[in-house]
Amino acid sequence: MITVSVTDELGTTQNLLIGVSGQLNFAADLSVEPGTVNPGGTVVAVFTLTRQDTDQPVAGSGVTFQVTDGPARFIDTDGEEDNLSTGTSPTDSNGTVFVRLLAEEPVESDTVIIKAVADNGASASATFTVEETAGRIEFSGGSPATFVHAGALPAGEIEWSQSYTLTYLDADGEPIPGAVLVLDTTLTSPSVQSVTLGDGTPLPATIITNDDGTSPFVLNFTVTHDDIPADTERTIGSLVLVGTSGDGDRGSRAILFNVRTEDAEAAEPLEISPSSVTVSDSDVVAFNASGGVPPYQWSLSGSGSLSTSTGTSTVYRASFPAGNAAVIVRDSAGNSFAADISSAAPTGLTLAPTSAAVTAGGITAFTATGGVPPYR
């Protein structure tokens, strides 16, 4: 692989990757989904490298990605900027590499061109389009889907639960309440065995926005993996979460599932994400454990309930009315960590209507809201 550079009189430099190989028995493929996104949407690019003579995957080959044109940049698993226009990762045991990109506002071109070049010179390119729709669907939340394990991890499956919030805005940036939206996934890697809402409903599924144009939800993921040696960081799967409206508005969120194995004696401290949260009546929140020495055991102190007592994730459902609680996780080494749950301050107690005129024998209905139910 070589890099061709050009510099103008102002000192601006543009680099282009070119693969050079004396062997032509490698096949490279690059897929990007979704093909069209709003500014602020994210996509997953999947590069696959195989041997043409045996059709077998090529593992351990370094792959360099570059945005050669268009409004996008690479981001890491936390959503932060990752070296702007280039990124490098090795292929896994399936000969694949996953990267995420964030679409930005178009300036000169709305077409993004991505190029990937392997160490052996095999290369592939792909494109996607950044296009503004009348309305915009945005996703927020979702802690990094990274499972940390002390020592080598034998083949198996990992379950994640993630809390997200969908926001639907019109062309003026105003919230759109009461909208029925469809959640679905695309470019789902074969290792992703299932994707469901917090209540177990499989995708595609519909959700409805609240008065402020938002709709919080929980997603459960089950992802399989091969044996992973100690001191290794690997992406084991990916998908793109897509939200669409009946008017054709859309939004996307690219999700990577990562595993990091560490020396058993140098394991990171046991933690829960999020470490604290404020809830209202009947809210649902996903908690994820990392560090320590898995497997984990979950328990609850206070009001509410948990979806499961084992695994890397659990989903907390607040009581009605909401109360204070703590979600506790313990690992196999006896370490523990607690996440604090606080109930939101209740709104003032009100009665509607505030006054009424009735005749003898008449009937008037009153409705109580706010305060702390039950009422008497």
Image (cartoon, helix red, strand yellow):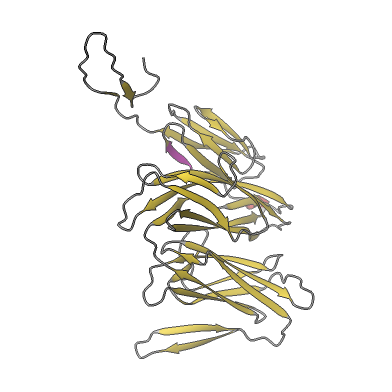
**Residue 208 location, x and y as percent?**
44, 44
Judge left or right: residue 73 versus residue 52. Answer: left
**Residue occupying image coordinates x 39% and y 62%:** 133
Please tell me whether the stretch drawn in magenta is mainly helix, strand or loop.
Answer: strand
**Residue 127 location, x and y as percent?**
52, 73
**Residue occupying image coordinates x 75% and y 78%:** 52
Examine the rendered structure and indicate whether residue 82 appears above or below residue 324. below
Count the labels in the image.
0
**Residue occupying image coordinates x 66% and y 44%:** 294
Asked whether 128 falls inside the magenta stretch, the response is: no
Tell me the quadrant of the picture where the N terminus can be found.
bottom right
Judge left or right: residue 41 versus residue 265. Answer: left
**Residue 284 location, x and y as percent?**
49, 37
Q: Nearer the viewer, residue 170 or 46?
A: 170
Examine the rendered structure and indicate whether residue 231 appears above or below residue 373. below
Can residue 153 be seen in this snapshot?
Answer: yes
Residue placed farthest to the top in the image? 360
**Residue occupying image coordinates x 47% and y 59%:** 79
Q: Nearer the viewer, residue 172 or 14?
A: 172
**Residue 37 location, x and y as percent?**
46, 64
Judge left or right: residue 200 versus residue 230. Answer: left
Asked whether 276 falls inside the magenta stretch, the response is: yes
Residue placed farthest to the bottom in the image? 9
Can residue 142 be seen in this snapshot?
Answer: no
Judge left or right: residue 353 versus residue 87. Answer: left
Res 191 → quadrant:
bottom right
Q: Nearer the viewer, residue 289 or 354?
A: 354
Tell me the quadrant of the picture where the C terminus can be found.
top left
Q: Which residues are magenta?
A: 274-278
